[in-house]
Image: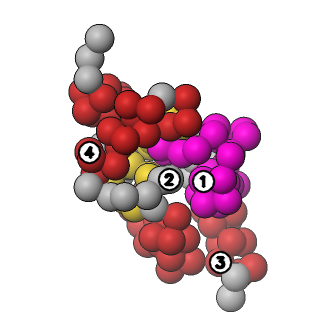
Amino acid sequence: MTDARTRIAETNAANDVVLYMKGTKDMPQCGFSSRVAGVLNYMGVNFVDVNVLADEEIRQGIKDYSDWPTIPQLYVKGEFVGGCDIVTEMTLSGELDQLFDANGVAYDKAAAEKIREANA
């Protein structure tokens, strides 16, 4: 069996958008994971969810991999983006749209605008 770092690297390389979270995109098990998954789901982003509660090696391994102490963690094209606060800020500022555009990630631009309007 491969170690957690290898599994994480392979998952990130094989998918454009990956969210390491507590629970799943359909059933988040913490408020922070729910917020990030909710944003991605609402924006229609096709992403892979990795439930860290189902695998202790991945739960600790992702923290070591990114040198970031908290979950959720969002990766786009293999690059660490951030956790809940950073993703929220990027969504509200439009930076997340720019990141998706720059990396060829499809999303609903109108939905992204609605999030910003609702939080203005």
If you read the primary sequence from the N terminus, does the residue marked by circle 1 or circle 4 appear first? Answer: 1
Q: Is residue 40 above or below residue 113?
A: above
Please check the rendered image and state whether residue 36 is part of the magenta-colored stretch, yes or no.
yes
Amino acid type of the residue that numbered disc 1 sits on in the rendered structure: Ser
Amino acid type of the residue that numbered disc 4 sits on in the rendered structure: Tyr
Q: How many C-alpha atoms fall within 10 Å of the one at disc 3: few (<14), some, or many (≥20)?
A: some
The residue lying toward the viewer, choosing from 33 and 41, is: 33
- Tell me the distance, in whole angstroms, between the alpha carbons under discs 4 and 2: 13 Å
Residue at left offset 68%, top offset 88%: 120
Image quarter of residue 16: top left
Q: Which residue is mark 4?
A: 65
Q: Which residue is mark 1?
A: 33
Q: Which residue is mark 2?
A: 72
Q: Position of residue 12 (x, y in %)?
A: 34, 36
Residue at left offset 55%, top offset 36%: 53
- Tell me the distance, in whole angstroms, between the alpha carbons under discs 1 and 3: 19 Å
Q: How many C-alpha atoms fall within 10 Å of the one at disc 1: few (<14), some, or many (≥20)?
A: many
Q: How many C-alpha atoms fall within 10 Å of the one at disc 4: few (<14), some, or many (≥20)?
A: some
Q: Position of residue 84 (x, y in %)?
A: 52, 64
Amino acid type of the residue that numbered disc 3 sits on in the rendered structure: Arg
Q: Position of residue 45 (x, y in %)?
A: 58, 47
45 on left or right of 57: right
37 on left or right of 15: right
Q: Is residue 47 visible?
A: no
SS label for mark 2: loop
If you read the primary sequence from the N terminus, does the residue marked by circle 4 or circle 2 appear first? Answer: 4
SS label for mark 4: helix
Q: Which residue is mark 3?
A: 116
Residue at left offset 38%, top offset 31%: 57
